[in-house]
Amino acid sequence: MRLGVVILAAGLGKRMRSALPKVLHPVAGKPLLAHVLSAAEMIGAERVVTVYGHGGDQVRTVLADAGCLWVEQAEQLGTGHAVLQAMPQVADMDRVLILYGDVPLISAETLNRLLGVAADTGLGILTADVPEPSGYGRIQRDSCGRVVGIVEEKDATPDQRAITEINTGILVADRARLDGWLARIDNNNVQGEYYLTDVIALAAAQGVPVASTRPGRLAEVAGVNDRVQLAALERDYQRRAAEDLMRSGVTLADPSRFDLRGVLHADPDVVIDINCVFEGAVRLSTGARIGPNCFLKDCSIGRDTQVLANSVIEGASVGADARIGPFARLRPDSRLADHTHVGNFVEIKKTSLGTGSKANHLAYLGDAEIGAGVNVGAGTITCNYDGANKSITRIEDGAFIGSNTALVAPVRIGTGATIGAGSVIARDTPADQLTLTRAPQRTIPGWTRPRKRPAS
């Protein structure tokens, strides 16, 4: 059965009070619509069509690589009208699944269950039982419990409004039958719109069985209409991500103060302290400990390595039994070997640090190749940029760089060399020797500090 998915994403989203289209607001660092597109991909949809409207150009630009077809709903005439715009794009599909761009947490598991229960019927819908159904369409069932229709709240009687089983809007239908039902719906209702939900009554009237199932969690079918709802879904996502990590053997100091905005692969016995943010693809090996208030993006942390408080690691790899921070910053293309130390207020960019090498205080190391067993003193910088080009600094094994040293690239520091504190090194230095560029120290006899002139 060839499955096509239609995602409705044309709404204005007035209550968001934002210039950003509603479906581009993020949950877990990813646009709402991107979550829905991922779900469609996970269930093996052969074709995905997104119906856009307000802010459509921006939506299409942000999600240009989504791999879906785009159809514009120029006039907002209701959900039935929106699906009609997409039907020509799925004309060769066997079944069509309708999803919503502002319902981001729908799971592939729930959708596969819906597809399964509706496999032998012409229509299947996802319903939910909620304690407060206000605002939702109510499910109508006959005395035998069969679904016979959906009534929108604005069109419902008081008795119908008392029903707690609601329509989530998510449905799957035989494509040919859906074409026929959509052709028959009208806008004779309070809102003057073409309701997609009207196809339920049309199907029931034709004797077509309407299968139904419910989501595993209510959050799966929760939509986003304002920033309060957006924040609620964010915390739901993060809570589930935290629970999955803990079940896999990771310790979280406080699961409510954890944020994942990508994919985190963490081995057992990793420990993560409070207020840490993970973006992109992050790998934490067994025994790694991440201190409080750290930001890690697109990086890997080796076995038993400690990342101390308030450190930022982006696009870098760190070996085993290393120590990073506190207040350290590793920028992209930094590669730290085993047993390295990068301490407080040290910034490293596009630099390799060999086994056992250390930069413990107040240094900038950019575009450098640093060997094993090197000690970089406080205040050291690699002067890697001349205003036009970047150049490489090479520090060979066992070198000792004294505090407050400037290494003017391109330059090579020889194996075992020592650079005296306060030096500016602009030429290669030999191995196993002391090199320094200090001016001779002088004491000026009889010198006194200037004094303020007395007030006149």
Image (tube, grey):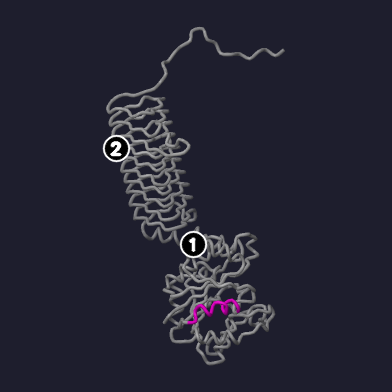
Prevailing secondary structure class for the magenta stretch in the rendered image: helix
On whether residue 362 falls in the magenta region, the answer is no
Q: Amino acid at mark 2?
A: Ala
Q: Which residues are magenta?
A: 81-91
Q: Which residue is mark 1?
A: 237
334 or 172: nearer the viewer: 334
Residue 456 at x, y percent in the picture: 72, 12
Q: Residue at x 43, y 84 (%)?
A: 119
- In the rendered image, the vertical position of residue 303 relative to residue 128, given as above or below: above
CA gap between label 1 and label 2 equals 43 Å
On whether residue 88 falls in the magenta region, the answer is yes
* Apparent side of residue 278 relative to residue 371 in the rendered image (left or right): right
Extreme residue in the top direction: 446
Residue 198 at x, y percent in the picture: 60, 84
SS at mark 1?
A: helix
- In the rendered image, the vertical position of residue 329 relative to residue 263, given as above or below: above
448 or 118: nearer the viewer: 448
Q: Amino acid at mark 1?
A: Tyr
Q: Which residue is mark 2?
A: 372
Residue 455 at x, y percent in the picture: 70, 14
